Amino acid sequence: MNPLKRRSTLRFAAVAAPVLALALAGCSSSAGADDESGPAASDDHSTATEVSAPRVVVSYDGGLLLLEGDSLEQVDDVPLGGFLRLNPAGDARHVVVSTDDAFRVLDTGVTIERHGDHAHYYAEVPELTDIEFAAEHPGHVTTHAGTTALFADGTGRVELFDPAALVGGEPEATTYESPDAHHGVAVALEGGGLLTTIGTSDVRTGAVAFDSSGAEIARTEECPGVHGETVAADEVVVIGCENGAVLYRDGVFTKVASPDIYGRIGNQAGSPESTIVLGDYKVDAEAELERPQRVSLIDTDAATLRLVDLGTSYTFRSLARGPHGEALVLGTDGAIHVIDPATGTVTKRIEVIAAWTEPIDWQQARPSLETHGHRAYVTDPATSTVHVVDLESGEITASTELPHVPNELSTVGE
């Protein structure tokens, strides 16, 4: 039986509209953890303003702020209740907002016109659309292989759609129902397949991969506490475990063991420019809150793991990748630590904000790092500010004080 099932309706905030099933075999895009290709803008820009950079979305307790990507000038303030998490939708324009009971879709108003290797951004008025994917405990959102995957922790349901269809307001969708509800994640694969986690509300053990027909092609249960995912160069999917990581390549799972009995990797950052994945690394299973000072570098070619001591702690919102595949970590010392993934050497330290302490509650605001091309965006909840850092020069090119305390970040565009 094909586990990828048609969904006859897609729920909206105001109405329910019929949709067709998305044929996963028809999904394709360039390689990378996040597909940012997006449709080209129309030649008619009569209602749009050309801008120099993509927009930035910042969540706060009670809504969303939209900022211009270079100047950080505020574009809009969108009220929205509940704890909000931000995720790229995969089309260079929309952001998926995880709310208490649904995945909502924010249209940032940005369109793109390409001329050779150059992209021009045109921006219109943003809008919190009526598109709503109802979900019990909305969890991870991934974008890969031209498909966006939503995982509902409360049911184990995975919903998949083509993000390019969001402009039309009614994306076609298909679903996969996990055997048991759990805090999981799913990733669409090139060629129309699907990789998704295995687990229950009590224990998570690994992952399973299906081909485009829904037939199981690989399975691993060597990943206790499975959490998080990313995609490295050459289409290698990496998922974290409490004792290392698991790689998925060409229909085969490969275990990469931690040097410690408990060596948890739960958050990862990959780059299409690198075969090496940046991950966090924790070793105290009993800690209420461990503040690690080492990060992991997972070599997907050699299936090995290297640890790098930063001399400062960091959090799950501290990991990112630069335009050349460099590994970036925002430390609690207030600096971005730039790591050469091939050697594990810290090559640069860019001071951005004052030293800070990670709060105990994971939902409490803490500094966040997000990258877009050569720009790095850093929030500072202590001062309600956000900064733009040029990763090439190490200079802070813009800073602004926000009317609310910032929590999460997301960007759109190329």
Image (cartoon, rainbow, N blue to C red):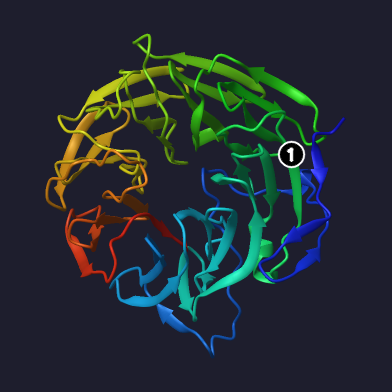
Given residues 342 and 289, the one toward you in this image is: 289
Tell me which residue sits at (64%, 58%) in the image. 163
Tell me which residue sits at (56%, 23%) in the image. 202
Tell me which residue sits at (45%, 67%) in the image. 118
Q: Quadrant of residue 56?
A: bottom left
Q: Position of residue 20 (x, y in %)?
A: 83, 57
Q: Is residue 192 visible?
A: no
Residue underneath mark 1:
176
Give the tally of numbered discs. Answer: 1
Q: Is residue 26 visible?
A: yes
Q: Is 347 located above or below residue 115 in the figure? A: above
Q: Position of residue 354 (x, y in %)?
A: 12, 50
Q: Position of residue 7 (x, y in %)?
A: 81, 50
Tell me which residue sits at (46%, 55%) in the image. 86
Please state, as top left, top right, bottom left or bottom right, where the N terminus lies in the image.
top right
Q: Name which residue type carries label 1.
A: Tyr
Q: Quadrant of residue 31?
A: top right
Given residues 377 and 191, the one toward you in this image is: 377
Bin the neighbour count of mark 1 within 10 Å (Cα to Cα): few under 14, some 14-19, many 20 and up.
many
Per the image, label 1 sits on a secondary structure element best described as strand
Left or right, 157 with reference to 113? right
> Which residue ends up furthest to the right in the rendered image?
1
Q: Is 66 located above or below residue 275 in the figure? A: below
